[in-house]
Image: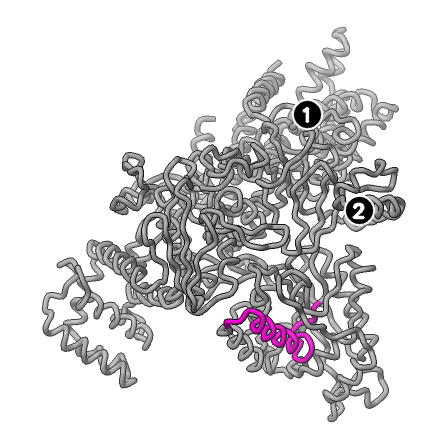
Amino acid sequence: MIRLVVRRLLQMPLILLAIYTITFTLAWLIPGNPLENPEGRRPPEEITQAMLEQYRLDSYWGFYWDYLGKATGVSWVLGAHPRPFDLGPSLKHENWTVNEILAAGLPVSVTLGLAAILLACVIGITSGVIGGVRPGSVVDLATLLVALVGISLPSFVIGAALLVLFSVRLEVFPIGGWGGVSHIVLPAITLSLPYAAYIARLTRFGMIDQLESDYVRAARARGLPEWRVVLKHALKNAFLPVLSYLGPAAATAMTGSFVVEKVFAVPGIGTHFVDAVLAKDLTLIMGVVLTYAAMLILFNLVVDVMYRWVDPRIEL
Amino acid sequence: MKLLAPFVIIALALTAVVWLDETPADADIVFVNQNEVFTLDPQRMSYLQDLRLAHVVYEGLVRWENQDFSILPAVATALPEISADGRRYRFTLRPEARWSNGEPVTAHDFIYAWRRAILPDTAADYSNLFFAIDGAAEFFDWRVAQSRGFVADPFGPEPPTRATVAAFAKRLRSLLDGERVPDTLRPATPAAVRVELDRLESALARDADPAGVLDGATNLQSWHAQLADSGVRPLEAVWAWERMLDHFDQTVGVRAIDDHSLEVTLVRPTAYFLDLLCFGVFFPVHRPTVEGWDASFAIPPRGWAAVTPPPFAQRRWVRLSPKTGKLEQKHEWAKPGRLVGNGTHVLAEWRYKRDLRLERNPAYHDPGRIRADSILALTIEDTNTAVLAFESGRVDWLADVDAEYQSDMLAQREAYETRHAARLAELRAGGLDRDAALAQLPPPEAGERRNIHRFPTFGTDFYSFNCRPTLSGGRVNPFANAGVRRAFVLATDKQVIVDRVTRLGEPVMTTFIPPGSILGYDSPVGLPHDLNRARRELESAGWEDRDGDGIVEDAGGVAFPTVDLLYTTNTPRYKWISLNLKSQWERALGVRVELRGVETKFYKEDLKLGDFMIARGRWYGDYGDPTTFLDLCRSTDGNNDRKFNSPEVDALLDDAAEQRDPAERMRTLAECERIIVQEEVPMLFLCQLVQVYAYEPGRVRGLSQHPRLTQFLWQMEVVDR
């Protein structure tokens, strides 16, 4: 297992470099000049040129190497730059550095994402188990319905509906914004629903499968109480597909959902990323993508390790 | 149990994180910024939400009275003395004016900020507004040339161009004959260099091939190699920077007579100069803050100008690039705790795309003017959520309701006003303003509302005609003919568009300048909606339906080219307007129109390349003079996307620039606008842009209704909050 972890960690920089190169090339090809306003007054030509030079936007390779050096800390090691892992100033919001933006936005997105995944697990596994134990029953059909709604209704509809119901009519939760437990509830529910639906389906099929297997029959034959059979024996094995789904799901949830963040005015990196792409804010795009990629790699690693922990028979 | 453990840990961690994060405290005024503030550096501002904050965080020499846009003193004690020729302004500054850190606001602060704005290194969008000041435009060009010389490399792998060699020669000349040149920058063989440089300059003057002249110039080449050394370049950058400072003092018409007297000399009497000074980009900044002077650097009570500034190494946010010689500025100083302003409020908190909090500036010289102790701006990008936040009472003022149902909200307001029309008229006759009168009425019933308000702005929505002689790829451009442009304008029913398409009830316009927005100026009347006249215009331009197929052809029988109508897809507004225009024109004129909706970036690119026949556009005025709009029609203007070129319009604009008598000048400009809106029509002017506000009437006070639509947050208050 140690070998796996080391190997993955050694692969990580290479994967990140590939992602950096591809993303940077694509972002570079977005038409337009990030330093210019999309509408209205255009500054004189000299000024545009001066700004492009200052931010190294006048040459592809110039920017590529300069940014790579600063972001990886190589420039810092060589003594050419005062800080390591400097993702540069945001091109569009010049009072902020990308590091500051990520430092402020990432905890928000991670908190929201974790809460959503947690909620999704609770809802999904509970309804999955209930449905799996009695397939075809009214309860099972009810969970199927909820899962269908969760998967097919877009989050901006669910989000807006929750806002109108709980914030405007009932006034239990605040409208948008961030800070305090009350702000997290509605966006977390909205974000969790599609995941919950998927987890519920996975668990349900897993349970049906496991409950028909020999070891469950043996357990029942030995006279174990049904709840022990279901929760201790069947669920443990039915959970494995859910676990492999949780890795990428957690990474996606934690790197922010554009729609949920927008609807609830949550200051996470999901909105920053989409806005950055629209504005061609190169430094911010690269910063978010690199962070996202690193998180995805790490989460897959964590899931693999947890696999082994849950089921020691699995070879890694 | 194993499975449960990670979930418990995550849940505990979550609770901890959420617990630590604080909710924003309440404030006296809460409003919504739909877009995050881009910058709090006044010289770099150009967005509405940024400029709104400029009026609170900083204060200029003079300010607008935002109800009628007359001009009042601000940091200046009174309006300036103006010399008889109208070119020299003398301001006296309030001795009690203070920066938020207690240092005095002096004339040097203004000169520093303005120099920053003019300097090409700062890349201020609005640097050309400063070109009203004597010598500013020359200074800008001088610094551009100086920077070009710094990087010019005529001996490099690229073959030298004339411009490179000229810039190079200029640089060497200034180093050879300049003042205070450090020894390391001097040539090893001055005499030989001088001979070669003389030869180079005379060759340039003769228009000889520059590459040939450089061939034998071995001394110049070795000096150039000496200057290119990485240890020498920073020295030259500093030397060039200091020459720039001297040059600024010598050429640009701003002068501090003493710490509290400022004299400004203009190129020509500029009637709207004081109005310009009320604009955010002319506000002062605190130099030690902007440059990040080391904290250990003691500032005397007279202010930073009394000491020699620290070397660049001890300035945190600025540096001279050894590569380009330019000043590179970081803008991270514009943060709470760092930013030093001289306005009514100081920046107390700013969290990216979250909230921004302002608090009363204890050092402000006229505390009686401030209505609200604290102001909170929430960033809510989703328009629907912003409206919900307002409805829930969390937000007092929504400056930009652009939810898709905004027109329905306006209709509800209409319904409310209609029901109470008689009582409203009575209250208004009793001397109440509209908001106060609305507040007196009984509360709205279901399907009605009174908290939505339409404010006309200082902006015009229009469609541009491509005026280039030919289209991209050399295709024939029918719109090069003013008659065709007039036909399209005459064939457009604008009222239908604002009533049925946008449904915002924008005031329809036939002119470029929003009516009543500029004191002392009346726009002429533009072209009406007249289908018969439209067809006649098209016929006299040579386009007629000759074969009866419903499409107009020229004399040779060639059909009118399909009109390429370009619009942006970022809001649905322009799609709907464009669709309507298409059907109007196809019906009225016998032409075919093809819509091309693109993303803003592609749109901008197409505008630059002239790849369109008709394109949507809009323009907001910046200062209180007709030229803020009309300059857009100048043939040389950088924002003239139409490449409209009329010697007559140019000449009238030039005349107006020289005229001293304000009434006569306004007549000249009105004549210029008449040509634009009646004869040449480079644009189809559609309507005045409106802004939809949401606030409870009577509860939020201090908003201005003037079409130049500028709100001062310090002047606003919320009663019974």
Q: Residue at x 54, y 61 (%)?
A: A41
Colour scheme in use: one colour
Quadrant containing the N terminus of chain B in the rendered view: top right
Q: Which residue is mark 1?
A: A119
Q: Is residue B527 visible?
A: yes
Residue A249 position, x and y percent, is 63, 34
Question: Which stretch did the figure color magenta?
Answer: B660-685
Picture layout, residue B497 above or below residue A157: below
Which of the pair B7/A166 is nearer the observer? A166
Residues tagged by mark 1 and mark 2 found on one chain of the structure = no
Element type where label 2 sits in the image: helix
- Disc sitting over residue B345 in the figure: none
Q: Is residue A253 left or right of residue B385?
A: left
Nearest-to-viewer mark from 1 and 2: 2
Report the residue that reaches farthest toward the top.
A223
Q: Which residue is mark 2?
A: B428
Chain bearing mark 2 = B
User: For the residue marked with disc 2, what is the amino acid?
Assistant: Arg
Report the residue that reaches farthest toward the bottom.
B556
Residue B118 position, x and y percent, is 40, 59
Picture layout, residue B123 above or below residue B353: below
Task: Find residue B708 and report its image quarter.
Answer: bottom right
Q: Residue at x 64, y 82 (%)?
A: B480
Q: Is residue A312 visible?
A: no
Quadrant containing the C terminus of chain B in the rendered view: top right
User: For the residue marked with disc 1, what is the amino acid?
Assistant: Leu
Picture layout, residue B149 above or below residue A107: below
Does the magenta portion include A243? no
Task: Find residue B236 and report its image quarter.
Answer: bottom left
